[in-house]
Image: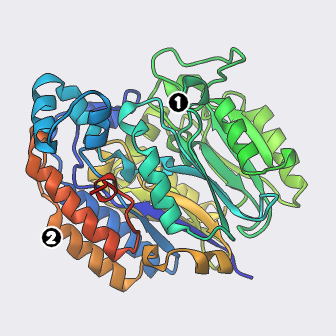
Amino acid sequence: MSTYEVNFDGLVGLTHNYAGLSLGNMASTSNKHSLANPQLAALQGLNKMKALADMGFTQGVLPPQERPCINSLRLLGFSGRDEHILSQVAKKAPYLLANVSSASSMWVANAATVSPSADTRDNKVHFTVANLNNKFHRSIEAETTGRALKATFPSSDHFVHHAALPSQAQFGDEGAANHNRLCADHGTSGVEVFVYGRQAWGGSEEPKHFPARQTREASEAIARLHQLSEEQCVFVQQNPTVIDQGVFHNDVIAVSNGPVLFHHQHAFLDSSSAFDHIRRRLSLFECEFLPITVPNDAVSVEEAVSTYLFNSQLLSKVDGKMLMIVPEECRKNVRVWTYLNHLMESGGPINEVKVFDLRESMANGGGPACLRLRVVLNPSELKATNPNALLDDHLYHLLTGWVKKHYRDRLGESDLADPSLLNENRTALDELTQIMKLGSIYPFQRVSS
């Protein structure tokens, strides 16, 4: 029975802009106030999805969110007609307008943590929506994310959906961006590696300049919710010094696929101990651990952050080898590109690299891995998935036409107060829910008459 690791990519939203909201994310803050091109951003993402689908990989799509988020502004004391609220916020609290207009839900690696049925005691796929409580603009995503996931994976016979953890600092959860799964094959039981930045109760070493967004306590809670056995879990601390260098999530410094963990030399606080632990756990499942360590003298942490070398996708090919999907920035950096060519020629498991232009997303702090949520599905689970969320030629053409019809090709922060932008967003999303058969997942669709 074939089992598929399906990449569900997030559609870039209509309000994609550069507000520089994410402290600790170098690209986000360095490009603050630049003009964005939402239409190009969405098309770049769709082109990556289509290319992978054309290569034979099963590819899914997850929708963007309603922005600006008027519901959040009402919760903060603004009232009246939606247009009046936007006007008042733009005048009195423009920082709030930027936050409630963020298109950050495009990076669905932060949407949830997913455990496949091969790992869970009830043999169902488990999803826990991330609370993303470290950043206000992301913390408002959880409710709609949960509805979108339930609309995409609706069958209670196959899928279990957990609400976000309590939105407290002790349970900071950033989703699959801090979660790796190692296994001999996608369909067999494996080891889930939870990477955390700090231990809320325990006095772990922490970064000095930027926040450690994921806590060990959150990762442990997710492991319990997902009915994972102790033998299937390893908890590893991220190196706090690399967090201070802009590695705000583990997927900026490491990526896994099958038995391979491709990572930077300085990714983890105690690699030797962590890898011994992983190796012992994997041996229980008759799987050999294959770590690929990129030395700092080949690629520095600074270069890893600027090129997003590790924010890549590792995909298993039919010949047993692996394909790496990297952004154009990797090819433009001589040292990184030299390393990748040596990697392909080394005889190891990764023997092919493909480059994609994702500069709109990259300039806002998200690369290929940020844009996708990995979901392992067996044939019956794939059949139970909303078919209108799985990319084929027909859906691709529908979505590219939808983007060209509704998206602006130029957007700055000053445009966020334009009430017509809110109306454009709602019109487009209403049409999208019909294309993808998602039902009423957005707040504007759920308002009582």
Q: Is residue 94 above or below residue 421?
A: above
Q: Is residue 358 visible?
A: yes
Q: Quadrant of residue 117?
A: bottom right
Q: Secondary structure at mark 2?
A: helix
What is the count of numbered marks?
2
Q: Is residue 53 above or below residue 142?
A: below
Would you say 18 lies left or right of 183 here? Answer: left
Q: Is residue 337 visible?
A: no
Residue type at mark 2: give it.
Lys
- The CA distance from mark 1 to mark 2 is 37 Å
Question: Residue 241: x, y in percent?
Answer: 55, 22
| Disc number placed over residue 213 in the picture, else none | 1
Query: Which image quarter holds the N terminus?
Result: bottom right
Colouring = rainbow
Name the residue rendered at 65%, 49% in the picture: 180
Q: Nearer the viewer, residue 10 or 241?
A: 10
Residue tagged by mark 2?
405
Q: Is residue 30 above or below residue 381?
A: above
Q: Secondary structure at mark 1?
A: loop
